[in-house]
Amino acid sequence: MHISILSLILVICGCSQHADISSEQEALLKADQAWAAAAEAGDPERILTFWADDAINYFPGFPPAEGKAAIAELVKRNRSKPGFSLSWKPVKAVVGAAGDLGYTTGPFTVSMQSPGGSPVQRTGHYVCIWKKLEDGTWKCAVESTIFENPTRSTE
């Protein structure tokens, strides 16, 4: 009886998986870098593949975009603005002990034209909370940006 209980405990303990946090942080950073490359290339369809289906995007001055469909509309609306471009550089990735949640952060720049046609550039920092799906891919679940500077325009 004691051997059966000990065997059961060993099987249960052996089944628990310990995430390789360093590898997961590297994978998460690479996912955000690939997302940034898709954004810089201006590929809306590829951009959307990095969002979780139930994601929320908080962008200053707009109501939260909840769900992939609402985020798709936000991406399309922004991408249709004259002179629009968005770039960011992931500089930090942190993954929790379980290896299934993490965040990335770094600086970003967004550019577009004002209603009068003058160029406007805004910079700031972003934070993205990611979740790891069962298939092993990382998807952004919550994203928020903070602008550092006021709107600059030559008008």
Image (cartoon, helix red, strand yellow):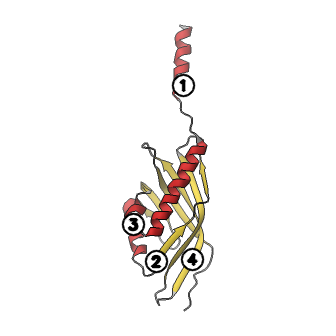
Question: Can I make out residue 122 in this image?
Answer: yes
Circles 4 and 3 in contact, beta carbons < 8 Å: no
Q: Which residue is mark 3?
A: 44
Helix, strand or loop for disc 3: helix
Which residue is labeled 1 in the image? 14
The residue positioned 46% from the left and 81% from the top of the image is 83
- Circle 4 packing at 10 Å, graded few (<14), some (14-19), many (20+), is some
Which of the 4 image quarters holds residue 69?
bottom left
Find the distance from the CA under tag 2 to the CA under tag 3.
13 Å
For marks 2 and 1, the one nearer the N-term is 1
Q: Quadrant of the C terminus?
A: bottom right
Q: Identify the residue under disc 4.
A: 122
Identify the amino acid type marked 2: Phe
Q: CA distance from mark 3 to mark 1?
A: 43 Å
Distance of label 4 from label 2 (alpha carbons): 11 Å
The residue positioned 42% from the left and 62% from the top of the image is 47
Q: Position of residue 105 (x, y in %)?
A: 59, 60
Mark 4 or mark 3, whichever is nearer to me: 3
Residue 103 image offset from top left, x and y in percent: 57, 54
Q: Mark 2 or mark 3, which has the lower sequence index?
A: 3
- Percent from the top left, x then y, of residue 48? 40, 61
Judge by depth and name the residue closer to the eye, 146 or 64.
146
Name the residue tied to disc 2: 84
Judged from this view, the residue extending furthest toward the bottom is 155
